[in-house]
Amino acid sequence: MPKMDAGKARLTVAFQGERGAFSHEAALDVLGPGITLLPRPSFDAVFEAVVQGSADRAVVPIENSLAGSIHENYDRLQSRSLHIVGETQIRIRHCLIGIPGAVFESITRVFSQLPALDQCRNFFSAHPHIEAVATYDTAGAVRNVLNARVPNHAAIASRMAAELHGGTVMTEELEDDPQNFTRFLVLSRQAASIENATKTSIVFALENVPGALYHALGAFALRGVDLTKIESRPIRGRPWEYSFYLDAIGDPRGAAGEAVGDLKRVARDLRVLGSYPAGLKRDRSNESPAS
């Protein structure tokens, strides 16, 4: 998705958490620095900000290479009438951040968002005296630790969060594996032009009959269309029935679009969530923070 050109109106972009959250980094990466940030306390509030018009775009995480999918956001994609118009994948480097003057040896409690804590399990296994405490946001955890001024408390968040909020980075790269990337989606009320699209995301449901999923995916296999993601989610109110989320690589005006058309004819329900440029892996963690 192209970044904003100089002179155009600033986009208001909603994201979950405080300034310095990884979603903040993702918004800068995919939309550029010429945006107005709208931090929101929850993912529901982020989606609603776009639905109600107080934000032009939302940037939300959808999956992590270590912790897996963020299922609640898949559910929100289906329940809100928003469109995916872009994506990015950023390297997640977790830092241990304390108040100025804090030392690592004194830390006994560490606060962060649950997915971040899950991505640092080896760190907590190696330091069993340190208690992991889940909070609503990584950057918010940094702000709270700095406001409380407790010397033996710290937070796990980005280096950007430390710099924006005035914290001290005591150690970094706490994640279990250096190949730690999170994929973020850009959401809008309007669909994007498919002219430069290379990826299409859909959600569909099938009749519960033998071979239904096999035949559904065959539409892509017969055309050589690469599927980079397929995820099932239970349908509320219909026990043991599922929706399937699928990401297909290719021009939606070509083989990928033809495959979606074939699937539409056999699916019970199908919705195209968006066609958009596929995002590349990026590492912004060593860049200076921007507003």
Image: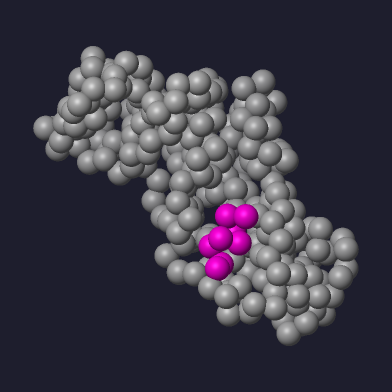
Quick check: 141 left or right of 118? right
Q: How is the rendered protein coloured?
A: one colour
Image location of residue 234, percent across then percent down: 44, 31
Considering every residue shown, the one lying at the far bottom of the view is 105
Q: Is residue 224 visible?
A: yes
Residue sitting at 83 percent across and 64 percent down? Answer: 146
Vertical placement of 205 versus 46: above or below?
Answer: above
Residue sitting at 88 percent across and 68 percent down? Answer: 149
Q: Nearer the viewer, residue 38 or 213?
A: 213
Q: Nearer the viewer, residue 39 or 135?
A: 135
Q: Nearer the viewer, residue 137 or 57?
A: 137
Residue sitting at 29 percent across and 36 percent down? Answer: 248
Residue sitting at 71 percent across and 61 percent down? Answer: 133
Q: Which residues are magenta?
A: 114-121
SS assignment for the magenta stretch, majority:
helix
Image location of residue 66, percent across then percent down: 45, 59
Quick check: 155 left or right of 124? right
Q: How many marks?
A: 0
Quick check: 169 left or right of 147? left
Quadrant including the N terminus:
top left
Image location of residue 4, percent across then percent down: 54, 38
Image location of residue 207, percent across then percent down: 29, 19
Considering every residue shown, the one lying at the far left of the view is 222
Considering every residue shown, the one lying at the far front of the view is 239
Q: Does the magenta run of residues contain 154?
A: no
Classify residue 235 by image quadrant. Answer: top left
Classify residue 116 by image quadrant. Answer: bottom right
Q: Does the magenta run of residues contain 120?
A: yes
Q: Is residue 20 visible?
A: no
Quick check: 288 left or right of 273? right
